[in-house]
Structures are given as C-alpha cells and as structure tokens.
Image: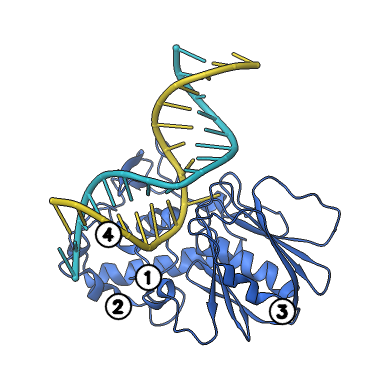
Chain colours: A blue, B cyan, C yellow
DNA sequence: ATCGCCTCCTGCGCGC
DNA sequence: TGCGCGCAGGAGGCGA
C-alpha cells in the first residue's frame, strides 16, 4: 500500500507520540509477518526513543539499545491510540505501550510488512545497507540516474522502482513520474537520454513532495496515524485511469502489465 | 551482473 | 446473496 509519501506521512504522525517516551510494554499478537519478528525485539522494552527516522519505506524507531525496523508492505499501517478503550482490530499484530499512555498499533492484513530489530552494536542491517539515495535528497540527480541506466535493458519503470537505485518510488508514483517526464514506461532504461533523466529526476521529486504535502495517496485503505486518508489521489494523472482521456492531450490512457505490476501511460504524451 | 518470475497473505469488487 | 476469480500501494529470492 504505502509508498514513500504515505510512509513519511505515517512517520510524521507517530513521531510526536514516540519521541523521548519510553516503551512500557510490547505485545505481539502475530509473530509471522513477511519475516518472523525476532525475539530480540524485546530489547526495546524500557528503552527511551531517541528518534523516529525514515529510510526509503522503512520507519526506524531508534533507542540506545538499537532500532526497530518497520516496513508497512502493501497493506500495513501504524496507528496511535490515545483512548485506551479503543478495541484492538483484526490484524492489529503488534501493540507498543508508551510512557505517555499512548498506544502504537501495527496493523497489516496481508502481512507483507515486517518488524525487525537491529542491536546498537551490530553493523547496518542488510536490508538498509545497499539502499540507493533518497529521492528528495541532492545525491539523487540526473548523473546518478544516467549512470544506473547505462546498458540496462529493463523497462525504465522497473528500474526506478528498484530500491537499490533510488528508494521510495512505488507503483503509483513510478507511472505518474514517467507521465510527467514524457517517457514511455516500457522504454529500455539504457535508451533514456541524459536530458530525460534530468526531467525524470525532477518529476519524481516534484510528485513525491506534492504527495507528502497532501498527506499521501489513499486508493482504498491508506490512513495516516490518526486514521485519516490522504488527498493526493485527485492529483493522479494516469494511475488507475485506463480508458479515460489523458488530461493533457485527450487520447486514451493505456494500461499494461510490466514486471507483474499494472502500469499506466499515455501513448501520445510518452514516447 | 542482470532479468523475469514467484512468493508471502487477506480483502474487495466484479461477473455470473 | 453467494461463489469464484482476478487484482491490489512491496520487494526479497531464486533459477536461468
């Protein structure tokens, strides 16, 4: 479900409730997520939370003893409950009670998400070690992208969704960014020019930032940590609009499967 | 190294 | 209504 804007929206939502609070207790109702939650997660108990960071689509809850690594997968969400009587819902797999009385709940119907623990004395977790640059940072630029695309035959859309090249670009924003940049998603990455890489980098930054500003995209069930939807859906040009008229040129928006994922584009606007 | 396919899991909307 | 089917915002891992 969540792409970078939704993860960032979530991070911002939970941070005020977690920062400088200690973890009074942790209750695991379902250990089996994408990977089993490690027993070492219990090291977070009684620790004070120093930071709530994001790296790509991972939320990192840092303490002196180590950090919890949370990924929301396709259907996950983190929710803060301040009303202690609010009942636990189906698929609320993990509950973290904080010293301020707030309760953080990890909800994930499909269980593609994960909750891992990295001890403070361990090297960077292998899931984080090889990630590409953050799309909104300066080191994600046309020079980086052109270097990553040379001699690559995979479709450009698949390439920008590869977190080892740039993190945080998921299925919705990949289609949207390619539309904004005027590049056909199916084009071999190696055939994208430098000038097009510049456009694409700018498009990715603009779209992700705009979406963050609007609280992310809600297609069916994304809600932020307060249970509110995001409002970026209305800003989508092509995603989910197959058969509709392109908003720029009025030709018909196409849908095609690429790398097992639905992909949307305009034949006229994207070459 | 690169590529394409498979997999994990539940829920929902659709057509019959 | 009910059922079966296909699809869904991710991404590691595998074999070729």
Q: Is there a contact, CB below 8 Å, between mark 3 and mark 2?
A: no
Image coords of residue A183 (percent x, y)? 29, 57
Q: Nearer the viewer, residue A260 or A104?
A: A104
Q: For marks 1 and 2, give the CA distance.
A: 9 Å
Q: How many neighbours does mark 4 have within 10 angstroms: few (below 14), some (14-19), or many (20 or more)?
A: many
- Residue for badge 3: A19
Please name which of the two marks, 1 or 4, marks the residue nearer to the observer. Answer: 1
Q: Is residue C15 left or right of residue A33?
A: left
- Residue for badge 4: A156
For mark 2, give the secondary structure. Answer: helix
Q: Nearer the viewer, residue A228 or A14?
A: A14
**Sequence order check, earlier mark of 1 and 2:** 2
Q: Is there a contact, CB below 8 Å, between mark 1 and mark 2?
A: yes
Q: For marks 3 and 1, give the CA distance.
A: 28 Å
Place residue A63 in its image quadrant. Answer: bottom right
- Residue for badge 1: A166
Instruction: Please give the chain letter of the residue carrying mark 3.
Output: A
Q: Nearer the viewer, residue A45 or A170?
A: A45
For mark 1, give the secondary structure. Answer: loop
Query: Is A59 above or below relative to A184?
Result: below
**Sequence order check, earlier mark of 3 and 1:** 3
Q: For marks 3 and 4, give the CA distance.
A: 39 Å
**Sequence order check, earlier mark of 3 and 4:** 3
Instruction: Please give the chain letter of the residue carrying mark 4.
Output: A
**Sequence order check, earlier mark of 3 and 2:** 3
Instruction: Please give the chain letter of the residue carrying mark 1.
Output: A
């Amino acid at each position: 479900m969540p792409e970078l804007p939704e993860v960032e929206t979530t991070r911002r939502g939970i941070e005020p409730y977690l920062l400088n609070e200690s973890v009074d207790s942790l209750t695991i109702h379902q250990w089996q997520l994408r990977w089993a939650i490690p027993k070492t997660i219990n090291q977070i108990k009684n620790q004070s939370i120093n930071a709530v960071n994001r790296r790509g689509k991972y939320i990192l809850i840092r303490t002196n003893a180590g950090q919890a690594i949370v990924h929301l997968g396709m259907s996950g969400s983190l929710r803060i409950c301040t009303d202690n009587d609010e009942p636990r819902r189906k698929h609320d797999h993990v509950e973290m009670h904080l010293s301020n009385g707030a309760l953080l709940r990890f909800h994930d119907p499909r269980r593609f998400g994960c909750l891992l623990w990295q001890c403070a004395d361990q090297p960077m977790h292998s899931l984080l070690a090889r990630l590409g640059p953050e799309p909104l940072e300066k080191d994600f630029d046309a020079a980086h992208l052109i270097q990553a695309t040379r001699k690559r035959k995979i479709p450009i859309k698949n390439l920008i969704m590869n977190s080892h090249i740039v993190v945080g670009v998921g299925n919705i924003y990949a289609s949207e960014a390619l539309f904004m940049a005027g590049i056909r998603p199916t084009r071999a990455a190696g055939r994208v020019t430098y000038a097009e890489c510049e456009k694409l980098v700018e498009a990715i930054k603009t779209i992700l930032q705009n979406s963050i500003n609007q609280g992310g995209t809600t297609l069916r069930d994304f809600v932020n940590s307060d249970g509110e939807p995001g409002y970026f859906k209305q800003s989508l040009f092509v995603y989910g609009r197959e058969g509709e008229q392109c908003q720029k040129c009025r030709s018909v928006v196409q849908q095609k499967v690429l790398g097992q994922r639905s992909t949307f584009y305009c034949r006229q606007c994207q070459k």
